[in-house]
Image (spheres, rainbow, N blue to C red):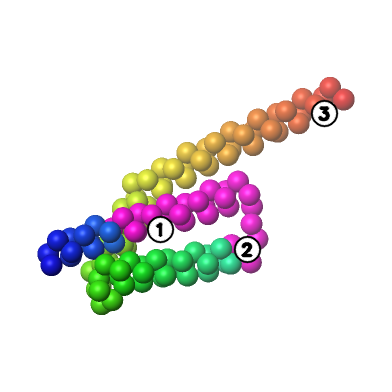
Amino acid sequence: MISGEIRLAALSFLTGIRLMAGYDGFRVLRLFVPHGTFLTGAEDFFYLTYCGISVFAMLYRCGDGAFRAWAVAGAFLGMALYQHLVSRNLLKYLKKAQEYFRIKRKKRQKSKQVKA
């Protein structure tokens, strides 16, 4: 019984990390491919629906169908830790890369205009 609870705690923590990593995929997509508010809202709606289904499925499979608030808290903790340690730094470097390529593109366009 105890090993099942520990397994559920670890799985809920890892689920939180996986869900935030998935959201980072949307963030990267939005960074390099600008979206309107409708598309961003639709992406967020489907992402949150997926998150709810994922946590429910995890609880159903490993928690014998019983709602365990500490397992949801474990998923939240995994998400918060991933956000604090990985996501912030990843997005900071990706924004710098985006700015670097934007500057290079502008320089290339200027040099083409000068040659023409």
Residue receiving disc 1: 19
Q: Secondary structure at mark 1?
A: helix
Residue at (37% x, 45% y) in the render: 86
Q: Examine the residues drawn in magenta and state their main secondary structure.
A: helix
Q: Where residue 10 appears, x then y in whole percent? A: 24, 57
Highlighted magenta segment, given as a residue range: 13-40
Whether residue 80 is visible, yes or no, is no
Residue receiving disc 3: 113
Tell me, yes or no, whether the two marked residues, 1 and 3, touch with CB atoms within 8 Å. Answer: no
Residue extending furthest top?
115
Q: Where residue 16 appears, x then y in whole percent? A: 34, 59
Dot 1 or dot 3, earlier in sequence: 1
Q: Secondary structure at mark 2?
A: helix
Tell me if mark 2 has few (under 14), some (14-19) or many (20+) residues whose alpha carbon lies within 10 angstroms of its own: few
Residue at (60% x, 46% y) in the render: 32
Q: Secondary structure at mark 3?
A: helix
Tell me if mark 1 has few (under 14), some (14-19) or many (20+) residues whose alpha carbon lies within 10 angstroms of its own: many
Q: Amino acid at mark 3?
A: Gln
Q: Amino acid at mark 1?
A: Leu
